[in-house]
Every structure is written in structure tokens, then in C-alpha cells.
Image (spheres, rainbow, N blue to C red):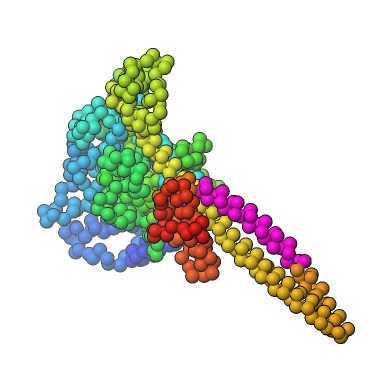
Amino acid sequence: MFILKLKIFAVVLAFLAAPLVLGSGDARAQDVAEEMKQALELRRDLDNILSERKAAQEAPQKPAQNATQPATQNAPQKADDTKTKVIPRINPEAIPKSVSGNQAQAPAPAQNGEPPQNGAAKVFNPRPDETDIVVPMPCGLSMVFKLVAVPAAGYLGDVELRQGVLAENEKGFVERQFLTPLASSLKLENLAGELGAKAKGLLGEKADYQLYFIGKYEVSVGQWRSVMEGCEALGPGAELPMAGISRVESLEFLKAYNEWLLKNGPQFLPAFKDKYVGFLRLPTEAEWEYAARGGQMVTLEEMEKEKLFPNPGKLSLSEFGFFSAEGGEETGPKPIGTLAPNPLGLYDIPGNVSELCNDSYKVSTGDRLQGTEGGNLLKGGSYLSSGGEVLPGSRVETPKYTAQGETKLPYMGIRIVMSSPNTADQRRNEELKVDFKNLASVDQATQNAVGKAATAVTGAQPQAPATLEPAALMALEPVERINRLMPFVESAGQKVALSSLLRDFANYNELKAIETKDQAKTLFDSVLFAAYGIRDTSLRRNQVISNLIRERAFLDYYMDNLKSTKNAQKKAEIQDLINQSNQVIATLTPEVAEFNAALENQFAYYKTSLQFLTQYEPKLLATIVNQTKGEYQGTDSYSVSMNNSLEVTIRDITSFLNSQGASVVIDKVALPAPTPAQK
């Protein structure tokens, strides 16, 4: 459970800020929310006071004042007065005329090249670039999106996205990798005007891909206030990501923004016949993670290979996001767009604030998500998270409600997407029918491809559909079989399906390799501990045998003395010693037998396990040997004993493999061939 820490700044006399450190735990969530609300109200009052003071400074009849001049004693009363003012919910400004870049939306810069005087750009697009899709907001602000292209054919195609991380620990049920179908309901043909022209230029050869748009940044405080509180609420801190909101409040924000956009900028939304339009919502987990890993700017193979995303510049994780690294802890979120973007151009993907998804949380079973709906699903981690918790595959659940009400966490924010209905209009419905009909014919087309491939492999003529699986083709490995089929498949959708199947095999093989390594390591450890046990049992048995030999020598000595002694008292004493020796011998003799039986069982287990172990590839065994050596690097007696046992195990594995006709080395250093005596 994360430790919830938040520093909230309030008005105290000379507008100086005093940190208030709140408690931690879910039980404090509602208290934290209430204190945040009060602090934000004070902060808004302070913003209003500062605005009035700035206006007074600029008035010609009054001298300029220092912005840091101490406040008067009646400042708190002024703050209380502002609470009675009615603030309009929405106060729209002029609508931008272009979606082709951020510059059309922001106020013009000053002549000296400084940022805009009102600093609006830092609230919604501090890092503009030519691939931005800019959509207006109230108060002259904007929401900036990035186009995301999904390599799926038609409207019914999808790609299987491998999500999560390889969590081989106690959090495996939370983060273990799983497969999710990813698709989108938008295509280039659904975008008109400048929005369509911009998207067409960005897509290039990927014009037939499915599309959606995702926020370039986390929604900022200023953007939130412009929709929910009005332009008068804008002020310092507007460039920070909005946090401390509940799921319901985020949906209310989206509802208000959608309604404003439909009224003031419908041309910025995808449009269809029958009055259907696109809309803004929270992203699904698949949409969020696909975009977070780089979207169409990287390959699916690269996504699955990298824990973060491809990073040609070799930047550290802390250069992409704010989080609590070892040795330090972030005390709060930072302004949006401060650090480096991901390959798609998205900022603050790792850390800063955790981002709500449209999905509810579900448990991962290792290949898919289990069906039970849970609480809020958060992605990306926050300033309170560790480095591992801000990776794109990391997943966190928080309750939607607690005993105190809606869950509002000081590190929980949002990033939004633009999408559309699946069955948007009659034309879309007709296209869906065609796609469905094509899918229904995939099986028959695949059977025909099998027949053509069989002819290529065997030279025989294609057989009837019922017998289209000749032995020569079916004897091939699955991946090779699909590769042989691929040239004979004509449909683009079928090729996408087969390509997806190839990736599935590759992913399966990767997971199978990990599972195989785990199994081999477990078996190797069993063999190693068996060798350690044999060594320990042998030492203990040898000690008992040594004691038995010594006691028998004493007995022989006593018997000789008994024969040569004439004194009756001494004879009695010697007889007592003889009796004691006989008792010791009677005790030790069965112990030796027990040790011998134990060693026989241990040797049998060791030999059987060794035979199973040597069925694994020598290269894998070498990796496991080197890994195991690193586990026993200490100088204590146990580590020394385990290293001795490891040498014996390596020698026996090498000897066994060589006896089977293999010449192998499973250690970093080549082992000498075992001598006849060792054999």
C-alpha cells in the first residue's frame, strides 16, 4: 500500500506557505480529500487576491508594488469575502481555427521571445510539436492529443497485445503478463476537414489502420478548472496535473467538456451520419498501455521486449518521469511536460500522477484477465511509486468507495482519449456486415491455403478440403508450418491473423522458456541439495564408523587385559569397561546400518534426478550453474560446503553427459575429463 503524503499550501499572513503533512492509509482517504478541498478553496481565494493586486499595480494612479510584499492584516477577511462570489461553470473564449499545431491556440509570444504573458501554453502544451492534434477548451485553453494507429484490418480486426510484466513474485497475480485484444472504432474515413487532413499526413502508409487519439499530457489543474469552475478560477499551479479527484468527478469533467465541445467546436470531433459523433472518455487499459509503450512508433515485438519502451538515447527512467527513487521521495507532482516524452510523444507516462482507466480492475491469471470486476484501475504510477511501479505494465487497484465515501487520492489523475461508437451509422453497419462475412470465410480460405502449401511441400496435387493435411506439412513445427502457409494467403485480414498467430507462438515460446528455466533451476537445486545431503550423511556416517572402530579397539584392549590380570578387583573393573564398550558398539552398529540405508536412498534419488536434469540443454545448464554460483559467494561454512557440493554436481553432470557421447562444458571454466577413479 502506498504511503499517502501531500503538502498543501494555505494562506498565512504574508502569503507564505506552511506545509501540512497528512496521515497515511485508506482510512484517511476521505479526511485527506476534505482537507484538500479546503486548501484548494484557500488557494483559489489567494489567486483572486493576487489578481486584484496585479490589476492595482498596473493602474497608472497607483505605484507599482513588489509581488512579494507582505499582505495586510485584513487579507484573511478578503479571502472570506471571495467565497460569496458566484463563479460561472463555463466561460468560453474564442474557438481556435486550426488543429494543425499548438501555435494557433496559444497567445502570441512577447517581442523579446519570452513565453506568453499569461503563461497559458504551459497549462496545456508546454512542449508543442508538429504532430499535435489540438482541440479547444474554455478560457482559450486547449487539449492536445496524439494520434494512435492500431495495425488491425477493417472494423472487426484487432491485435493481441501482451500487457503486464513478467512478475515471478508474490505480485504475480496482479501483474503477470496476459493477452488482450486491442482495436479501435475510428478509421481515417471518419475524420473530416483539417482533422482528417492532419491525420492523413501523420499516418502515411498506415492509412488503413484503426485510430484513436490520446492526451499528450495528463489533464492539468488549469484545464480542469476551465471546464468545471470557470476562467476566474485559473491561477498559479494551473500547470500541475489535476489530482485528488474521484472516478465520478472525472466522468463529470468529461461530460461537461463533451457538452461544451459539441456546442462550441463540433468540427473537432469525428462525425457520422444519423447524428452520431465522436466523444471523449477515459482510456481502456489496452489503449493506455499500447500508447504508453510507443504505439505505432514501435513494433509489437519491441513492445514485448522492453519493460519501458524503446529508448535509443539510453535515458534513465528518472529522465522520463517523477517517482520516488531509492534514497529519496518526491513530495508532490510536477508541472506537465517537464521531462522527456515516450516514442509516441506522450509526457509523464511514468510517474507524476497515477492515471485512471475506463476499465475496472481484474486479476491476471497469467494468460488472460479473470472476469471479476473490481475497483479503480490505475496505470503509470505516481510521484509516490517506486521505479518498478511506474513501468507501463504495472497495474494498481484502488477501491471506488470506502466507508467514508468516494475514493479520492492525492496522486490519482486522468489522461483522456477521443473515440467513437462501434455502430456509428448505417454505412458503418453495412461495412461491419461485410467484415463479418469475410471472417466467416477465413476457415475455408485457410483450408485452401493449406492445400496449396501441401502441394509446395510434397509435390502432390491439392486434396479435398476434408483431407487437406498431408503428413509432410503437418510434421513441420507450427511456426514453420505457418510460414509455409503465408505466401498462399491472399486476404489482408487473414495475413494479419496469421501474423498474430506467429507472435502468439513467439510469446508462448518465450514464456515456455522461462517456465523451462524455472523447472530446470528447481531440479538443479534438488540435485545440489541431494549432493550436499550425501556429503553431510557421509561425514556423519564416517564419524560413527570412526567411533565404532575406536570402541572395538578399546574392547580388544580390555579383553587382552582381562586375560592377563590376576587381581579380582581389577578384573571386575575391566569387566565393567568391557560391558560399557559392548553397549556403545551395540548402539553404534545399527546407526551405521541406518546411515548406509540413508545413503543408498540419497544416491538413488541423486542419480535419478541427475538423469532428468541432463535432459535439459547444456547451454541452459551452464546458465543455471553460473546463477547458482552467485548464490553461494560467502566465506561462511555453509557457503563453502555448498560450493564443494556444487563442484561435485558439476563434475557428475559433465561425466554423465560425456558418457552419453556428448562433449560439453556447463561451467565457465572447462572441467577436466573425469578420471577412471572418479567414474
What residue is rendered at 39% in x and 32% in y? Answer: 477
Q: Above or below — where is 558 with respect to 382?
A: below
Q: In the figure, is residue 153 to the left or right of 520? A: left
Q: Residue furthest left?
A: 111
Asked which quadrant contains residue 527, the reply is bottom right
The magenta segment: 586-613
596 is within the stretch colored magenta: yes
What residue is rendered at 23% in x and 30% in y? Answer: 207
**Residue 654 shows in the view:** yes
| Viewer-closest of 186 and 56 | 186
What residue is rendered at 30% in x and 56% in y? Answer: 316
**Residue 261 shows in the view:** no
| Viewer-closest of 423 and 395 | 395
Asked which quadrant contains residue 12, the reply is bottom left
Q: Residue furthest front?
A: 564
Q: Above or below — where is 529 with respect to 548?
A: above
496 is within the stretch colored magenta: no
What residue is rendered at 24% in x and 47% in y? Answer: 125
Q: Which x, y percent locates residue 34?
A: 46, 52
Q: In the figure, is residue 388 to the left or right of 646? A: left
Question: Count the marks: how many?
Answer: 0
Q: Which x, y percent locates residue 572?
A: 86, 80
Q: Residue furthest right?
A: 568
Q: Which x, y percent locates residue 517?
A: 45, 48
